[in-house]
Amino acid sequence: MSRICIIGAGLSGLLCGMRLSKAGHEVVILEELTSPGGLMASTHIGSEYIELLPHHIRRTDKALLSVVKELGIDSKIKWYDAFWYGRASRKKIGYFEGGFATLINLLIQTITDNGGKILYSSSVSEITRKEDGTYVTTCILSDSRKYEVESSYVIFTGSCRTFVNVSHGLPISMNTRDQLMNLTYQSRICLALRMKKIPSDAYIQMKFPANDELPFARIINHTSCINDRSYGGQILYLVGKCQITDPLWVESDQKVMEEYFRAYRKLYPLIKKSDIKSWRLTKVRYAVSEQFPETDLSEPLDNIYVCSSALTTHPAMEVPENRMDRITALANDICARIINKESSANEHKEEAIITAL
């Protein structure tokens, strides 16, 4: 069996790690942060875990729900009727008992149970390839030491632009590089607030016709729908689109919080700052890709894969959204390709041995 280096311990990286370690491969996952989850990272609040960015499951998330069933935690999903502001009907949304940390922690447990390793505080600086086809992934550890992982395969789960930056030493065609670099991204700033009260019973609010200058584009009143939790307060998210050239992007967390909350009070003047029990600000540089490519770019070179939400379909005129189901399906597909490739290679080896005998 082969060694496989996976870059990123978000949902797609952990899912690939689970599938490939269960198939008997040696898996090493490199994560630049000190904790797993990626865009699904959680924090502890009250006696619960909750995501730094809002998440929920849809009934149509077939690939994700299939993974959940495979892991045996489908019974841990509770379904809620969610009222979306501006829409007449309600929607069913799912949420894990214990939050999405339930899924992330079980993926990690399965990987480690099958001999896989996850190395945190490991920032990848370069991916190169030796003459024999082996890949070498170089990363910088938190104490500035360099660490190298040699592997037969590499799966990169970050943004396409970051992949291009760390793979400049690989013989990838200029056309493929250009297409990957042309996939631009939107950034996100998300303020998660634990409040004494929230003034709306809508789960999601997205249109504010009288206040089109608000710094955030969406309000998610988490506990207006998912209210059977022990957070020690009411949870709402204020989610804003932001370019890195925007002055707000480089402001301190405190200033951004004040700006967001000031704008929120324009919508709900009766809410006071004293109603805030705690808050957490999260900035995501590569949150959502702005378009899909014209062709499949998920394998830019033999045995190296890019599992990015920007590459989940092609060609498509639709505007991409950060949906868990598509990235889950792409991760499944990449793992299937690797497993099939390894199986075919082993069959050819056995045929060669029989012929030699």
Image (tube, grey):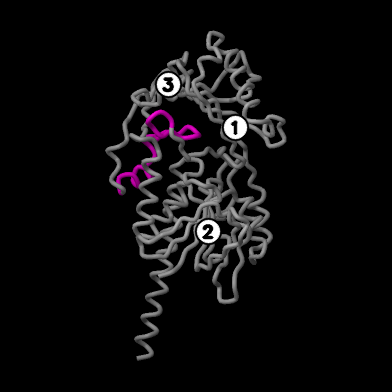
Residue 233's disc number: 3
Q: Earlier in the sequence, mark 1 or mark 2?
A: 1
Identify whether 40 is placed above or below 162. above
* Residue shown at 45% from the left, 16% from the top: 196
- Residue 140's image quarter? bottom right
In-front residue for pair 131/66: 131
For label 1, the crowd category at 10 Å Cα-Cα, with few meaning under 14, some 14 to 19 and many 20 or more, is many
- Which element type, helix, strand or loop, lies under badge 3? loop
In this rendering, position of residue 234 left or right of residue 188: left
- Residue 17's image quarter? bottom left
For label 3, the crowd category at 10 Å Cα-Cα, with few meaning under 14, some 14 to 19 and many 20 or more, is many
Q: Which residues are magenta?
A: 45-70
In-front residue for pair 246/122: 122
Q: In this figure, which residue is indicated by the disc labeled 1?
A: 189
Identify whether 170 is placed above or below 287. below
Residue 66 on the magenta segment: yes
Q: CA distance from mark 1 to mark 2?
A: 29 Å
Q: In this figure, which residue is indicated by the disc labeled 2?
A: 305
> In the image, what residue type sits under mark 1?
Ile
- Residue 47's image quarter? top left
Q: Earlier in the sequence, mark 3 or mark 2?
A: 3
Q: Position of residue 5 (x, y in %)?
A: 50, 61
Q: CA distance from mark 3 to mark 1?
A: 22 Å
Q: Position of residue 203 (x, y in %)?
A: 44, 22
For label 2, the crowd category at 10 Å Cα-Cα, with few meaning under 14, some 14 to 19 and many 20 or more, is many
Q: Residue furthest top?
A: 270
Quadrant including the C terminus: bottom left
Identify whether 283 is placed above or below 226. below
